[in-house]
Image (spheres, rainbow, N blue to C red):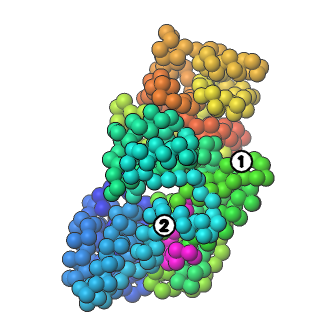
Amino acid sequence: MILGGGPNRIGQGIEFDYCCCHASYQSSASGFQTIMVNSNPETVSTDYDTSDILYFEPVTLEDVLNIIESEKPYGVIVQFGGQTPLKLSLPLFNWLNSKNGIRTGCKILGTSPISIDIAEDREEFTKILNELNIRQPVNGIARNEKEALKVSEDIGFPLVVRPSYVLGGRAMEIVRTLPELKRYISEAVKVSPDHPILLDQYLSNSIEIDVDALSDKDGNVVIAGLMEHVEPAGIHSGDSACCLPSISLSEFTLNTVRQWTKLIAKKLNVVGLINLQFAVKNINNDESEVYILEANPRASRTVPFVSKAIGKPIAKFATELMQGKTLEDLNFTKELIPNFQAVKEAVLPFKRFPGSDTLLGPEMRSTGEVMGLAKDFGIAYAKSELAAGNGVPTKGLAFLSTNDLDKSYLFEIANDLTNLGFKLIATEGTSNYLSNLGITVESVFKVHEGRPNIEDMIRSGLVQLVINTPIGSQALYDDQYLRRASLEYNVPTFTTIPAAKAAIRAIKSLRVNDLETISLQEIHEK
């Protein structure tokens, strides 16, 4: 019996449906009769021929228990439907171990719900990390406003704040001042002993890393995919582009991530899939600091991407592991590093929501994803941007406007764009900064400074590329107009420095390479 994710919504979607379908296909191939429990008319998992039996019912404890009592399945898989079935795992486990549940002969397959609950519980998970000597950002839990202010004083700003037990970063924010924290507590979330908020040290200018790994009943762990994000930590992983294999991480960082992944998977007694997220600071020196952000003992939204990149059906593998096989049985005993570059990019729905801002943050906005494949990162990234509906220009006029913290990174970007033949325009502060460094750049009005301003130029079709990294509420408001104009007139826009650097690598590659298409079958045959 496989529990799906329920209705599609931002933060939980087709990636989980992919995993549920693969679990059904593999279970059928292994000789099991399959039961799918899901209530989503838009997904393949609820097609009449995906499973032997389909219960088109809400994925709630009451409905699931009714089906178990009726069907008496051998076991239940909760790892593949995202957060919805994961929340049911512990009450389901408790019921199955009660007098009524024992009579059904059913069990939860794979990772124990007790381990799942430990990974979800901030305080319990921190104890495990301390025991394993694994570093995490300084953090705290607050059950009322007084506790939140005390934790913020201990950690210091900026902070990442979020409700506990949420999906897709819902109501997650980066707060930089005490008034912003008070506003968050009073307006954004309900804080109580039953609804605590989590406060974490915000790791500025750090790179985020995503890991999908498989673990079997004997405690063997193999990394399926170790991905480097393009956008910095603080942008939700579902909205960030990522690449496999890594393009800039040191061997020290990669080996630390591999070691910590295996330690955590073994400690939690994971059977099946686990997803972990890390961040690394000071990447360009020998003292890079690796932090773990979270661990989810379930399938993640990157499973389809990793499967296609390495040519192995890891959701099917996880299903077999939950049914008792080992990694050795599956002949999957070591990490596979693709000999080409795979880039995942998010598809964002901003055009469908008039007035919405395209700025990315810790709350997930994407409604899908695409994949670019090539021998070279630049071409792979260009392909992914093109598939996501953005594209990157190879010539024209580029507008630059960054916050003061990002200006130190701007010279390299401006210099590269100039060498590539782009003409540069910028708002006054950025223009003066670059001019003093010897970069030729023309000054242009901000939206509120007069006309013709940058928004007018975008709407007139004069601008081919926008790089805009605001910080603070006033800058966010000022620049929202130009980002909206860029969206409406299809001008590629990058709102973080790493994404801007990736775009420049794509432009450089497009200058010397043609866009070639090749199927996954051809790639994995080679």
Q: Nearer the viewer, mark 1 or mark 2?
A: 2
- Seen at 68% across and 17% down, the residue is 432
Badge 2: residue crowd in 10 Å (few <14, some 14–19, many ≥20): few
Image location (x, y in percent) of residue 424? 65, 22
Above or below for 392 versus 261: above
Question: Please, what is the three-letter code of the amino acid marked with disc 2?
Answer: Glu
State which region is magenta.
266-277
From mark 1 to mark 2, how far is it between C-alphas? 29 Å
**Residue annotated with mark 2:** 124
- Seen at 47% across and 61% down, the residue is 122
Image location (x, y in percent) of residue 333? 63, 78
1 or 2: tag closer to the N-terminus: 2
- Seen at 38% across and 67% down, the residue is 86
Q: Is residue 142 left or right of residue 507?
A: left
Q: Is residue 332 left or right of residue 282?
A: left
Question: Please, what is the three-letter code of the amino acid marked with disc 1?
Answer: Asn
**Residue annotated with mark 1:** 282
Along the line of sight, the residue nearer the viewer: 200 or 113 = 200
